[in-house]
Image (cartoon, rainbow, N blue to C red):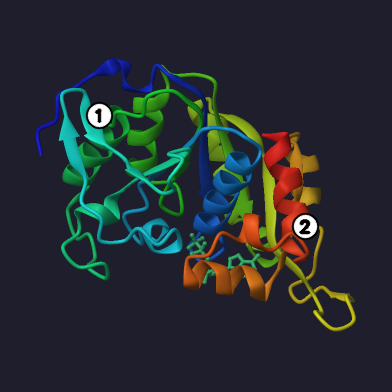
Amino acid sequence: MEAAAEPGNLAGVRHIILVLSGKGGVGKSTISTELALALRHAGKKVGILDVDLCGPSIPRMLQVQGKAVHQCDSGWVPVFVDQEQSISLMSVGFLLEKPDEAVVWRGPKKNALIKQFVSDVAWGQLDYLVVDTPPGTSDEHMAVVDTLRPYSPLGALVVTTPQAVSVGDVRRELTFCKKVGLRVIGVVENMSGFVCPHCAECTNVFSRGGGEELARHAGVPFLGSVPLDPELTRSLEEGRDFIRGFPESPAFPALSCIAQKI
Ligand code: ADP
């Protein structure tokens, strides 16, 4: 596991975006993946760093699970997702022997792995590095923030669902950013309403608008609401590129618009 420590490995990265959420299941990995695809679609070179030790799901979402990671002189080589090599991924999932295996290491070992992952991957030149973090605010987040802090601009994108807003998870996430001096790029409300595929009427299954109100209250930008979209779920399950394949689908305009704001 010893890789050559190369502090310049992130030197060619122009923007680093930490994707945070108060709890699991709100769509943090989905938003990370789709924003990376939307940025790639807009002509950007993008890397994704998946340090969600609780559930590294991005390799599956991008259909590259089971790929082996290699080392070169300047560190770990990320896995290229597309033929054009415009999107690359490094995930904790690549180190697990079985995809469903849980990471049961204790804190210090987890933090060491995270630090190594953050600093020892040979990303090359990237316009954006999207970092999918574990849910909540833990030592692991501190490890990520501490390692990335020298590389700027670094910012956080906070994902919530309308119902998560009401239980205060997102507020804690925003407080964490403030405490550690992390700039908040903005809040995204996910699973915000369901657009009927037959009549196009939007039903607010879990209420709507809480994310925007919270962002206003906290004095941070609100980046947009992404509706519940069955086509998006299917694309993620089948590893299809939603951004390229489903421009008519309800979540597409929201995701494209958010990608333009970051
Ligand atoms: P997290 O990373 O926060 O744990 P995931 O990104 O894994 O959450 O999403 C949880 C589930 O919800 C996944 O099955 C994903 O496909 C689905 N999902 C997330 N956002 C949406 C959305 N806007 N529309 C439909 N399904 C979604």
View quadrant of ligand 1: bottom right
Relative side of 167 to 101, left or right: right
Relative side of 53 to 12, left or right: left
Q: To which residue does mark 1 refer? A: 120
Question: Is residue 80 or residue 256 the one in the foreground?
Answer: 80
Q: Amino acid at mark 1?
A: Asp
Q: Is mark 2 within 8 Å of ligand 1?
A: no
Q: Disc 2 on helix, strand or loop?
A: helix
Relative side of 129 to 175, left or right: left
Q: In the image, residue 249 lies at what x, y percent? A: 75, 66
**Circle 1 crowding by C-alpha within 10 Å: few under 14, some 14–19, many from 20:** many
Q: Quadrant of the C terminus?
A: top right
Q: In the image, residue 60 lies at what x, y percent? A: 39, 64
Which residue is drawn at the image coordinates 61% and 40% (left, top)? Answer: 39
Label 2, label 1: how far apart the Cα atoms are: 39 Å
**Residue 22 seen in the figure:** no
Q: Is residue 180 above or below residue 242?
A: above
**Circle 2 crowding by C-alpha within 10 Å: few under 14, some 14–19, many from 20:** some
Q: Disc 1 on helix, strand or loop?
A: loop
Q: In the image, residue 240 lies at what x, y percent? A: 53, 64
Q: Amino acid at mark 2?
A: Gly
**Residue 28 seen in the figure:** yes
Task: Give the quadrant of residue 234.
Answer: bottom right
Residue lying at the far left of the rendered structure: 2
Which residue is drawn at the image coordinates 78% and 64% (left, top)? Answer: 248
Question: Is residue 76 or residue 183 the one in the foreground?
Answer: 76
Which numbered disc flags the more N-terminal residue, 2 or 1?
1
Q: Is residue 243 above or below residue 132?
A: below
Q: To which residue does mark 2 refer? A: 210
